[in-house]
Each structure stands twice: as structure tokens, then as C-alpha cells.
Image (spheres, rainbow, N blue to C red):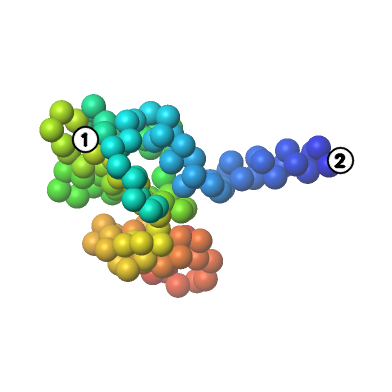
Amino acid sequence: MKRHLAGAAVALALLTGCGAGSNVRSFLDDTFDEQSESGDTSTYLATAPATAAASQIAGAVPPAAQASDSGSEYLRYDDDIVVVSPASGGSTVRVEDLDGAYRDGSYAYLGQGFTPGSPAATDDDDDDVK
């Protein structure tokens, strides 16, 4: 019985995307060359253009929300935000914890899924991310 409950818990976590933020960090570590790290923010170098690199990341670890603006791609996960920007010879991939600029509204201009608030909000207010 315990084995079935453990299997059900793992399946539920996979279906609901729990831990996707940590999974995206693992994917970035395994896939791209890390250029710098400061606190909860890491920057990587990708040889592909921003759109292709973002598609590669989103294909491997589906984000809760995705948006584009001025050539950069934004992927929001439950604990992290990934920003893929054009750079000479490819793109830069920056991942930062949601407790930083995201919570202060720095990405609100990207629209639904990027407005400040709890990504796990469960109330009936349509302005919150669900």
C-alpha cells in the first residue's frame, strides 16, 4: 500500500509541475555553460539564438507562463524566472529566484502569468496568477 501511495505522490507532483523551478535549474546546469553566479541568480551562455534556446528550455521543462518582449524570452516557473536574451554568438540565459525582482513587479508588463503575486494563488481574484 505504501508503494502505491508513494507512486501516486510522484505522479501528482509531475502532473502539477511541483518543483519545476528546481528542475529548470538542473536542466540549465546540464545544458549550458554557466558564466556567473550571484546569490540565487545564475547566468549561462547558449550558442543558439534566444528564441531557439527558450524553446529548448521550455520543451525540456514546461514553464507556468511564457512571454516575449524586445527579442528576449521570459519563462516563469513556480520558483524561478528564466530570461533568455540575444547576445553575440547566441544568447544569455539568466535564471533568478521569484523572491527577487518578480515579486516587486518588474515583469508585470509581460501580462498574465507575470504580474506580481503568488504563483500558487488559489483565491477567486482573477488578477492573481493561478
Identify whether 3 is placed above or below 101: above
Residue 108 seen in this snapshot: no
* In the foreground, 38 or 121: 38
Judging from the image, what secondary structure is the residue with disc 1 in?
Answer: strand
Image x and y of residue 61, in percent: 44, 37
Image x and y of residue 37, in percent: 34, 45
* In the foreground, 124 or 2: 2
How far apart marks 1 and 2 lie (CA) works out to 48 Å
Give the number of the disc on residue 1. 2
Q: For the residues carrying marks 1 and 2, which lies nearer the camera in this image?
A: 1
Image x and y of residue 130, in percent: 47, 60
**Which quadrant holds residue 34?**
top left
Query: Would residue 79 appear left or right of 12 to someone viewing this image?
Result: left
Image x and y of residue 101, in percent: 31, 62
Residue 125 seen in this snapshot: yes
Identify whether 110 is placed above or below 24: below
Tag 2: amino acid = Met
Give the number of the disc on residue 19. none
* In the foreground, 89 or 121: 89
Furthest-right residue in this view:
1
According to the image, label 1 marks what residue? 91
User: Callout 1 environment at 10 Å: few (<14), some (14 to 19), or many (20+)?
Assistant: many
Tag 1: amino acid = Ser
Residue appearing at x 32%, y 68% in the figure: 104
User: Upstream in the sequence, badge 1 or badge 2?
Assistant: 2
Query: Would residue 81 appear left or right of 20 to someone viewing this image?
Result: left
Identify whether 108 is placed above or below 29: below
